[in-house]
Image: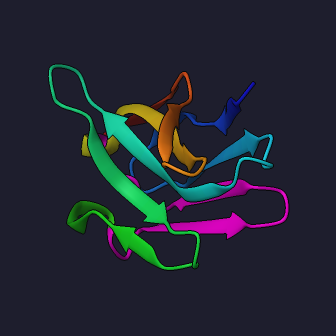
Amino acid sequence: QVQIRESGGGLMQAGGSLRLSCAASPDFYGIGNMGWYRQAPEKQRELVAVVTSGGATNYADSVKGRFTISRDFRENIITLEMSNLKPEDTAVYYCNAQIGRHGQEFWGRGTPVTVSA
């Protein structure tokens, strides 16, 4: 059974930093892209950052230069380093992994990030 386990997040003042981690298991199905999405109250879920199976990364314009995503391919863990946080970064952050031959998407339960002004 596929498990997506998230950790990190919490409350931080504007300008501060937080780290999110996500582990996907098991990996014998093959894990493709892994990334982070977020959903603020009354808004749609949006992509924050993704790292492909080849190691390429892509970021939302709103987080470029502030957030960094990395991936441990052996352990199937991704980490999102968030710096210079802004109140508009406040949201529930969800880990996403595409697993298996057809890239079926699996989601974590979400971890809240709150940035105070």
Residue interval drawn in magenta: 64-87
- Residue 91 is left or right of residue 23, and the answer is left
Q: Depth check: 115 or 113 in front?
A: 113
Specify whether residue 115 is in view.
Answer: yes
| Residue 86 x %, y % | 32, 50
Residue extending furthest toward the front: 101
Residue extending furthest toward the right: 74
| Residue 23 x %, y % | 73, 44
Q: Depth check: 8 or 14 in front?
A: 8
- Quadrant of residue 40 within the rendered picture: top left
Residue found at x 38% / y 43%: 37
Note whether 38 is above or below 41 in the view shown: below
Residue found at x 55% / y 46%: 97
Does the magenta-highlighted stretch encompass residue 67? yes
| Residue 76 x %, y % | 75, 55
Does the magenta-highlighted stretch encompass residue 42? no
- Residue 83 is left or right of residue 80, and the answer is left
